[in-house]
Image (cartoon, rainbow, N blue to C red):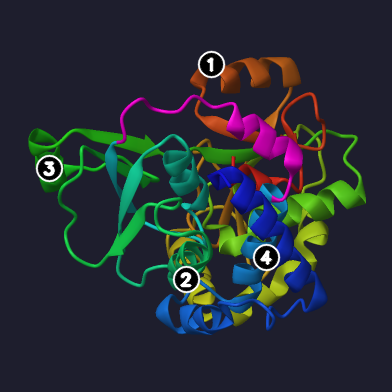
Amino acid sequence: MDLLTFINSNCKELLHLLNADEDGWQLPFIESINKAIHLNRWFDKENILRRLRCTFEYYASDALINDLTANEKVIEQKTIGLISEERIPMEEITTILNLINAGNKVIYKKPENYDIVLCSLFEYWQNKAGRELLPIEFTDRPIKGFDTLLITGREPWKGEKRKFFEKHHVIEKTRYNSIGIITDSITNEQFKAMASDIFCYYGLGCGNIRKIYIPEGFAIERIFEAIEPWHNVMLHNAYANNFQYHQSVFLMNKIKHLDNGFILLKEDAASYAPIGILHYQYYSDINKLKVLIDKENKYQILSNNPELGLKFGNADKQLLN
């Protein structure tokens, strides 16, 4: 059995177990899920299970597996060192599987407060299919013996870290930012989907919307109405601390903003907003806006209009693409 056939078959089995018990108690690595909650303050059980479900559904797709199978394999196996900041659960699963599927071996440097669920899932797969099919090693120590180092993150490495590039062959994979574009025709259901794209994983994923464009004259109060069901994010201490910090900064510096008690809306041209903040900007001509965004070529667009980008509600899937 080849790698993708195994992953496809096993993800179908794991999805079946998760469907049978949405709390995940039938999953063979449930203990790692419970440990992850204590290792990383951002990895709560709801988001871990959400991410696992999205992953299993993604790789259980026969059409997707057929597309991936067509990818060209490397002629000679390389050893790839992988360093990730792991902002959300299972963030690097697609990167790892793509590298292995291409014929490479992977050495994964576990960061502080590492994703134990990701490690446990691959250990589970290795126990079932063997390390030859899944040649990956997770390590706490500085990685050595690699041909190429792959670094993934939101920002390029700077300062002293750049000296690392003088000694090794390094590839940086800087993650994109996601933005949302609202048109006048948006429905309540599409608003609901957009809210999920903003708040799932507390907004930490590169697929999460951190800025929205809205048409001139649009009643911005409609956004607050749409996101109200997500007010429970304030029950998460780390999110609440971030929100309250930025709230204080805005008030002390008299920065104009809108506040609904769990997110701050600020009119700002910047595409990325910190946790607890959502930037917005008005537009008058949708065609000019699209040309401007396409020219910069560094954003993933989500919208209620499928002609502009992915439909709202697809942040989870985009995190895997």
Which residue is tagged 4? 50
Mark nearest the camera among 4 and 1 is: 4
* Label 3 crowd (10 A; few <14 / some 14-19 / many >=20): few
Query: Which amino acid type corresponds to the residue marked 3 in the rendered image?
Result: Phe
Determine if the magenta segment contains residue 65: yes
Instruction: In the displayed orientation, state which residue is furthest to the front.
Output: 1
Q: Which residues are magenta?
A: 60-77
Query: Which amino acid type corresponds to the residue marked 4 in the rendered image?
Result: Arg
Q: Return the x and y of residue 173 as percentages of the image width and height.
A: 37, 37
Which residue is tagged 3? 164
Of labels 3 and 1, earlier in sequence is: 3
Say whether residue 174 is left or right of residue 243: left
Classify mark 2: helix, strand or loop.
helix
Of labels 4 and 1, earlier in sequence is: 4
Say whether residue 109 is left or right of residue 281: left
Q: Return the x and y of residue 124 as percentages of the image width and height.
A: 51, 69
Label number found at residue 207: none
Query: Which amino acid type corresponds to the residue marked 2 in the rendered image?
Result: Ser
Which residue is tagged 1? 295
The CA span between labels 2 and 3 is 29 Å
Which residue is tagged 2? 120
Q: Is residue 294 shown above or below 149?
A: above
The CA span between labels 4 and 1 is 34 Å
* Cβ–Cβ under 8 Å for marks 1 and 2: no
Between residues 126 and 177, which one lies in front from this camera angle?
Answer: 126
The CA span between labels 2 and 4 is 17 Å
- Identify the residue shown where x is 69% and y is 62%: 53
Say whether residue 119 is left or right of residue 262: left
